Amino acid sequence: MSPKFGRSHKFDEVTRRDFFLLVDKGLSVRVAALKLGISPNTAYMWRTKAGVSASRRANRKYSDEDRAEFFRRLELNRNVTVVARELGFVRVTCFKWAHEAGIYTGRDVSPKREEFLRLRKDGVPRAEAARRVGAAPRSAADWDLGIRQIHYGRVYPDGRIVRYKMGAAASVRYLSSTQSYGQGVELERLDRPISSRYLDLAQREQIHDLRAHGMSIRSIARELCRAPSTVSRELSRNTTSSVGYLPYAAQRAATARRQRPKARKLLSEGPLRDYVSHRLSTRWSPEQICHRMVKDFPDDETMRVSTETVYQAIYVQARGALKRELVSTLRRGGSERQPRRSPTHRTSRFVSPLTSIAERPDDVELRLVPGHWEGDLIVGTLHRSAIATLVERATRYTMLAHLGHDHNADTVRDSLINVVQELPQSLRHTLTWDQGAEMSEHASFTMATDMKVYFCDPASPWQRGSNENTNGLLREYFPKGTDLSKYSADHLQAVASELNDRPRKTLGWDSPAERLCALLESVN
């Protein structure tokens, strides 16, 4: 027994939500309504108010030959439906062609008109015949003249059709957040697994269920073992203010967004391309164009383009989106894009693999045991001279190595070996250096001195803080912009001795030389 739908029947929010879930899974509006026992009219009203569009196939395109063939057959058979079926055309389109050509294809089945015409044929006056059938005088006059009434118009006996302007359609205000839940996506693409890094249908159903139970975004993320930002973006992209988040619709929308290649915005003629071309010709940068466009067209979402899209339209000649001569209007005027090398793919400066500072023993950080050193170069004018500096971490004891004009890897290695070999074995444990090319011979240095070399992270001078501070102190003796090769090894030794005899606040006002002697005595 089919359900009865009362005019005053009220449905709760749970029924409305279940209806949208059924539609989201692919059921038609009418089937979903009957399944829940609600009126199809109510269901269609819900869908209209929610602003949810139904899936529609793209309109078929007909040629002039198709239209001519339709009218040729219509001359032989006046039934539009039969002709449309024979040709495989859309029936509504064929009726539209016939009406535009002034061919009336309908038939009047009004019983009042038929009775009125029978009475008139029997000689009954028009007014009397209209009174008997209950017709309006204007309708009776039209029937008497052979005029047929159609929707918003009349068909005259000579085939002429007169259409009247339809009144202003009732404005329907839709919610600002609308979504098409019937996007055309092939079933094969919809079910094809992509990668575990993307949300699948099962996880989207889980998001819907957990959200319906009132769980927060972070709680849902923990349940799915996902980042909270992933869940947040999923809900913001696929949630409407009218029907909420629906998992099947979100899956179809995500699959449709993945489709490649996408149509390029600047490939076709239009206001967007004209705006970009004009601004480039006035030497605006792509970044200025993209951000200014938002201010110039705040309500026109079609006038939006990213900076990268503009650059690709200029540089990639194969796509031909913008004129090639616009390259000269860019700030740097380059004819081709220069690829940027990623820091993760930088060419190694060392033949032997380096050992990261992260692998350095933990007791080095405590500065309790002497023998752990930090090193670097201070460079003279035009990088033509240098001095190697070594600082002991626990005592801040400083040693300087003379290099002269040459400070390549071999020279730095030999100079450091000569300086380090003057130290007792108890003061030769580790050396921390930056990733400069001058230390590329670190393996042979380790073999000669039995000191393990550790390298700081790129652009991380604070990981050699003692050495950086000491280099600043040494600049009092060796100012920047001077030729360091003019200083002899004896002069460097005198500077190091003076610096080691200076008391330090960090050592409790002991000098580095005093602290080093005390540590050596305690170790012995």
Image (tube, rainbow, N blue to C red):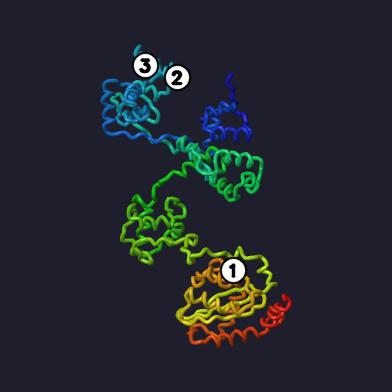
Q: Residues within 10 Å of mark 3 (few under 14, many from 20)?
A: many
State the residue lying farthest toward the top.
122
Q: Which residue is mark 2?
A: 134
Q: Is 209 situated left or right of 131 in this image?
A: right
For residue 87, which quarter of the picture? top left
Mark 1 vs mark 3, CA separation in Å:
115 Å
Q: N-terminal of the two: label 1 or label 2?
A: 2
The residue tagged with tag 3: helix, strand or loop? helix
Q: Residue at x 59, y 72 (%)?
A: 464
Which of the two residues, 383 or 36, is positioned nearer the viewer here? 383
The residue tagged with tag 1: helix, strand or loop? strand
Which of the two residues, 49 or 446, is positioned nearer the viewer here? 446
Q: Which residue is mark 3?
A: 117
Q: N-terminal of the two: label 2 or label 3?
A: 3
Query: Which marked residue is nearer to the observer: mark 1 or mark 3?
Result: 1
Mark drawn on residue 452 = 1
Q: N-terminal of the two: label 1 or label 3?
A: 3
For residue 518, which quarter of the picture? bottom right
Q: Position of residue 53 (x, y in %)?
A: 49, 37
Which of the two residues, 123 or 427, is positioned nearer the viewer here? 427
Q: Position of residue 438 (x, y in %)?
A: 50, 73
